Image: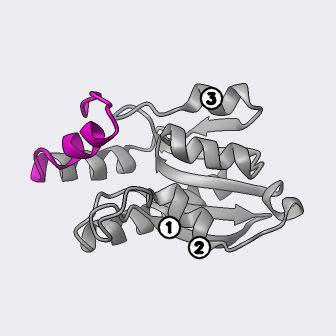
Amino acid sequence: MTDDKFFMDEAIREAEKSLEEGGIPIGAVLVREGEIVSRGHNRLIQNDSVLLHAEMDAIENAGRLNYDDYIRCTLYTTLSPCPMCSGAVILYNIPRIVIGENTTLMGAENLLECNGVEVDVLDDVRCRDLFLKFACNNPGVWEDELAKVGNSTEVK
C-alpha cells in the first residue's frame, strides 16, 4: 500500500533521529485517517528511561485522544513491538499496526492479533539494516536493554 510506505518512511526518520541522539534506532508514527497525529522514537538511552520505546513515545506525544480518535488510527513502527507497547495499542483500541520488520526481533504480535488488532509486516530492509548497523556499531547495548526485561533474545 502506497500510504504504508509513506508512513513507514516517516517512522524511519524517527528511528534515524533516535540514532542521531545516541539512542536505539526505532521509530514510530501514529496516523489517523491519513494524517500523522504524532511521532516518537526510542528514548531509553537519551532519557535514561525504562518506558520510552518508540511506540510509547508516539502514543504519549499524541496527547489524550478520545476513543473515536484511537479507533481510526494506525500505528507504524520500524520494529516488532514488545509486550508493553502491544499492551498500549490494545488498551487504546488502536485497530491496526504496521511493522517495518520483525526478523531482528519478534515482538508480541500474537498478543495483538489475539486481541483483534490487524498486524501488517512490510519486511522493509531499511528498518533491518538501520537496526543491525546500530547493533554492530554498539556491541552490547541492545543486549543490555533486553537483559533489563529478562529477555535473552539476541539480534539475528
As drawn, the label of residue 61 is 2
Residue depicted at x 70% and y 54%: 74
**Region rendered in magenta:** 136-156
The answer to which of marks 1 and 2 sits earlier in the sequence is 1
Q: Residues within 10 Å of mark 2 (few under 14, many from 20)?
A: some
List x then y, in percent, for residue 29: 57, 63
Q: Quadrant of the C terminus?
A: top left
Residue at the right extreme, as displayed = 68
The answer to which of marks 2 and 3 sits earlier in the sequence is 2
Q: Nearer the viewer, residue 27 or 140?
A: 140
* Snapshot colouring: one colour
Q: Residue 137: within the magenta? A: yes
Identify the image quadrant of residue 66. Answer: bottom right
Residue 10 horizontal side relative to residue 68, left or right: left
Find disc 1 in the rendering and name its residue: 40
Q: Residues within 10 Å of mark 3 (few under 14, many from 20)?
A: some
Name the kind of residue labelled 3 in the image.
Leu
List x then y, in percent, for residue 109: 57, 31
Q: CA distance from mark 2 to mark 3?
A: 24 Å
Q: Is residue 14 visible?
A: yes
List x then y, in percent, for residue 140: 13, 44
Q: CA distance from mark 1 to mark 2?
A: 7 Å
Tag 1 near tag 2, CB within 8 Å: yes
Q: Residue 19: within the magenta? A: no
Find disc 3 in the rendering and name its residue: 111
Residue depicted at x 36% and y 62%: 49
